[in-house]
Image: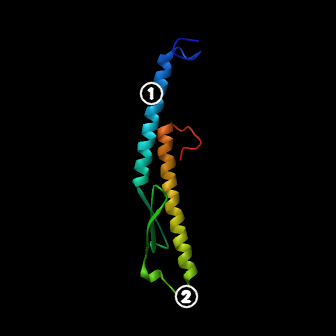
Amino acid sequence: MARGGFPNFGGGGNMNNLMKQAQKFQKQMEDMQSELENKEFSATAGGEAITVVVNGKKQIVSIKIKPEVVDPEDVEMLEDLVLTACNQALKSAEDQTASEMKKLTGGLNIPGMF
């Protein structure tokens, strides 16, 4: 075995470089994750009658409902609109996270990374 390293790794120098690269990658991921958690994503439904905002942690931040869409005789429609807007906003957050991860990993699919 090469001094200070593992066989086939050419000694400790290459292993040190590999560790530095891994630490740099980890820092970049942490920075990106923090940035994404602070972003907000919104979606609308029913011709902008419902607006939902979620954050990068996939938490609903706000729901806005225009008064004219509230019909006591058709609560089911309102529920569907809210559900649609929530799902679209969450999908937007997921898509943005996946896009940023793809940039960071060069397209590699690394399991457990978000």
- What residue sits 51% from the left and 67% below the top? 85
**Residue 55: assigned label:** none
Depth check: give the residue in front, 24 or 5.
Answer: 5
Image quarter (top left, top right, bottom left or bottom right) of the N terminus: top right
Would you identify the image quadrant in which residue 28 lies?
top left
Against 113, residue 6 (above or below) is above
Q: Residue furthest bottom?
A: 73
Q: Badge 1: few (under 14), some or many (20 or more) residues near its Cα, within 10 Å?
A: few
- State how far apart marks 1 and 2 are (Cα): 63 Å
Residue 11 position, x and y percent, is 52, 14
- What residue sits 53% from the left and 78% below the top? 78
Q: Residue furthest top?
A: 2
Q: Badge 2: few (under 14), some or many (20 or more) residues near its Cα, within 10 Å?
A: few
Which residue is denoted by mark 2 in the rendering? 73
Looking at the rendered structure, the kind of residue marked 1 is: Lys
Residue 42 position, x and y percent, is 44, 63
Label 1: element kind? helix
**Residue 20: assigned label:** 1
Q: Residue furthest front?
A: 4
- What residue sits 44% from the left and 43% below the top? 30
Render colour scheme: rainbow
